[in-house]
Image (tube, rainbow, N blue to C red):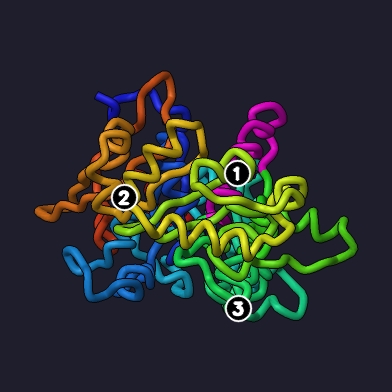
Amino acid sequence: MTEFLDLPLSGLLVLDMAQFLSGPSAALRLADMGARVIKIERPGSGDICRSLYLSDTDIAGDSTLFHAINRNKESLAANLKDPADHARVMRLIGHADIVIQNFRPGVADRLGFGPATLVETYPELIVGSISGYGEDGPWADLPGQDLLTQALSGAMWLNGDAGDGPVPTGLSVADMLAGHVLVEGLLAALVRRGRSGRGAVVATSLLEAMTDFQFEVLTTHLNDGGRLPQRAAHNNAHAYLGAPYGVYRTADGWLALAMTPLDKLAPLLALQFPPEAAASGGFAGRDAIKAAIAERLAEDTTDHWFERLRAHDIWCAPVLDWPALLQSEAFRRLDMLQRVTRGGAGVATTRAPWRMDGQRPGRARGAPAVGEHGADIRAEFALDRREI
């Protein structure tokens, strides 16, 4: 059974002092790798993610997102402004290997849990911190929120067609990417600690994650005279790729066409393109070429075009919705879904997106209720002891 794998981070203790998406997503990745994760939440309401997101689709009183991003964690309720709770959490940090935070800049310091203070107190501790836009500067006090970061990052001008305004990505991409970036840094810090015994403060921000996400096209912009990306007028999918790259409507659905030589594609669609189009990599006359391809593909079904083009090794794929993806044999073979439980509630969700030695880790414990494990954690780590 994959839940009994000798997971690589087994034996490590992680304290998740973060809330909503970015920090808790990093803690989730570490839990999937075998770490024990204790979530520190405010008493009563807990993590704001329990109610803020998709509150009309909740399970056992919590949002579906909270269940997805906090599975395999324990919960300790603590008011960080209360002296007794503050002391308990500081004692618990003394047992931890990693602490994850995503307070606004300055808040952790005011509460007495600033990264520098924690590492000075516990030299082997690794602290991971995510901010919105860095610890200082003119944007430091802006809300570290995904849509706002997408807006500031420039990425919205890569989506949609040329005639559109800025188009956001329909996922919390800045939050999730920042979580992944933080995990990379935390794992590197663990390796260094194994060699030197030194802890570390690993910091990133939503804006840094979104900047890194765009490194491919931003590097082009930085080295071609500062020209802005030019989205195609029709069927745009990548501002820096020529025709036919894009998504096209067919008679009964949609088809994605990736990098394909136009002189190879043209006869299969019974079309003719100017010689300079192929010579320019599909940029010369890009909009007109895409319009012609769109008109042709609309004449038949997705399956027809997929089979015809795949037979000639054209890079293409039908555009699936979630039901079609979930029903596909290719997806089922990946075994990416699981059902986790909390009390009598079951939640269908995803699993860790990696395999080790051919097996994917699966741990079926659902997200905790607020403070669910508090009594056991206080007893295990003697958090209620009186100092002498």
The answer to which of 125 and 171 lies nearer the viewer is: 171
Looking at the picture, which amino acid does disc 2 mark? Arg
Q: Is residue 154 visible?
A: yes
Mark 3 and mark 1 lie on one chain; the one further toward the N terminus is 3
Q: Residue at x 64, y 28 (%)?
A: 194
Looking at the picture, which amino acid does disc 1 mark? Met
Spot occupied by residue 192 in the image (x, y as percentages of width and height): 69, 33
Q: Secondary structure at mark 2?
A: loop
Q: Which residue is mark 2?
A: 71
Mark 3 and mark 2 lie on one chain; the one further toward the N terminus is 2
Q: Spatial distance from mark 2 to mark 1, Cα to Cα?
A: 39 Å
Magenta residues, as a range? 177-199
Which of the 4 image quadrants contains residue 330?
A: top left
Number of residues whose C-alpha sits closer than 10 Å to that of mark 3, classed few (under 14), some (14–19) or many (20 or more): few
Q: Secondary structure at mark 3?
A: loop
Looking at the picture, which amino acid does disc 3 mark? Gly
Q: Which mark is residue 259?
A: 1
Q: Spatial distance from mark 3 to mark 1, Cα to Cα?
A: 23 Å
Q: Is residue 375 visible?
A: no
Q: Residue at x 55, y 64 (%)?
A: 291
